[in-house]
Amino acid sequence: MEEFSIVAVLISLCALSVTLYESIQTRKSLREQTYQGFIGTWFDLGRIFIEYPELRPYFYDNLALTENDENYQRVMAIAVFYDDCFAYTESQATYIPKDLKESYNKYKDRIESMNAFREFKKKYTWINSRPE
């Protein structure tokens, strides 16, 4: 009977080890998938500025924006995309590598200080009702 107990304990320890290993692998996979989604989202935003380079100065050079500007609607649409990207990134913050968090925060602060982004936040308050 004692041999049976020892075998049962060994089998239980093996099962526990396999479960622990699978849990670690699942966590790694989740981190990798989240990071890939994070990078993909930001690459999509970058592609907009490749396709429409005339819009980049609104977000990188603080080009003034008025409602009469011919690019107003496109700039507002990009500001919405930025806002969504920021919200997504904040929701996944625990999965962002530490070395990228500081540069991300600087980038976010810079974009949020641009006239175009501030215009979006001011004009579309109903979109911006989520907590900061």
Image (cartoon, rainbow, N blue to C red):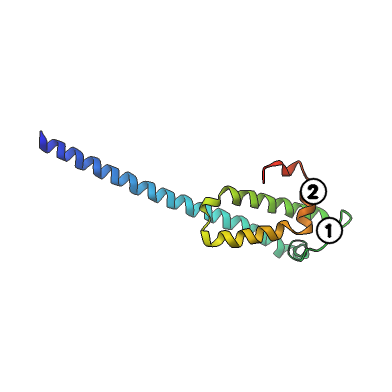
Q: Secondary structure at mark 1?
A: loop
Q: Quadrant of residue 104?
A: bottom right
Q: Residue at x 78, y 63 (%)?
A: 62
Q: Quadrant of residue 69?
A: bottom right
> Would you name the residue on which mark 2 appears?
122
Rounded to the nearest whole Å, what is the CA distance between mark 1 and mark 2? 13 Å
Q: Residue at x 38, y 50 (%)?
A: 24
Q: Residue furthest right?
A: 68
Q: Tell me the tag on residue 103.
A: none
Q: Nearer the viewer, mark 1 or mark 2?
A: 2
Residue 113, position as x, y percentages in the image: 74, 58
Establish if 51 lies above or below 1.
below
* CA neighbours of label 1 inside 10 A, class few (<14), some (14 to 19), many (20+): some
Establish if 34 lies above or below 52.
above
Q: Secondary structure at mark 2?
A: helix
* CA neighbours of label 2 inside 10 A, class few (<14), some (14 to 19), many (20+): few
Residue 88, position as x, y percentages in the image: 61, 49
Quarter occupied by the N terminus: top left
Q: Amino acid at mark 2?
A: Lys
> Would you name the residue on which mark 1 appears?
65
Task: Tell me which numbered mark, 1 or 2, is placed earlier along the sequence.
Answer: 1
Q: Amino acid at mark 1?
A: Leu
Residue 35, position as x, y percentages in the image: 53, 55
